[in-house]
Amino acid sequence: MNKTHIAPQEIRVSNGGKILHVTFPENQAYDFSAELLRVESPSAEVQGHSAAEKRTIGGKIGVLITNVEPVGNYAVRIIFSDGHDTGIYTWDYFSNLGENKNLIWGDYLERLTQLNLSRE
């Protein structure tokens, strides 16, 4: 069954805002750190308007999720402790991020190193 556009059964913040649990039907469940969600935000501020404009943001190891708000029936907006609140996280975005989390995280860490940035 194609997961595209299927809403999660549960979206839950835990560990004092450090983790977001997203559970889809068919027992597909993902845990995302607030840091990963913040540095890979789907917002134009982070992603730019093309792949060439994507920004690498350091210093977010301590960022927390302070709120999660529904956006229609296709996404949520996550508000972070650093004030970032413009990313719209669709169900497809969560699914893709969950399925490719290790690759995306590794790429982020490599970009930090290349740019002499820190997670701290």
Image: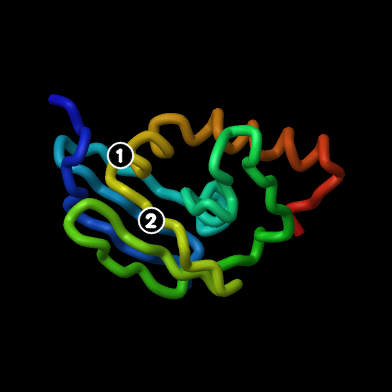
Q: For the residue marked with disc 2, what is the amino acid? A: Ile
Pick the front one: 47 or 63? 47
Side (left or right) of 77 relative to 26:
right
Residue 24 numbered tag:
none
Q: Position of residue 40 (x, y in %)?
A: 54, 47
Which residue is found at the position 53% from the left and 51% from the top? 44
Q: Residue placed farthest to the top in the image?
A: 1
Q: Position of residue 74 (x, y in %)?
A: 22, 51
Q: For the residue marked with disc 1, what is the amino acid? A: Asp
Which residue in the protein does label 1 denote? 92
Side (left or right) of 53 relative to 98:
right
Quarter that holds the N terminus: top left
Which residue in the protein does label 2 denote? 88
Q: What sort of colour scheme is used for the picture?
A: rainbow
Which residue is found at the position 25% from the left and 48% from the top? 23
Q: Secondary structure at mark 2?
A: strand
**Which circle, 1 or 2, is nearer the viewer?**
2
Side (left or right) of 80 relative to 113:
left
Which residue is found at the position 47% from the left and 49% from the top? 42
In terms of image quadrants, where is residue 81? bottom right
Which residue is found at the position 17% from the left and 27% from the top? 2
Pick the front one: 72 or 93? 72
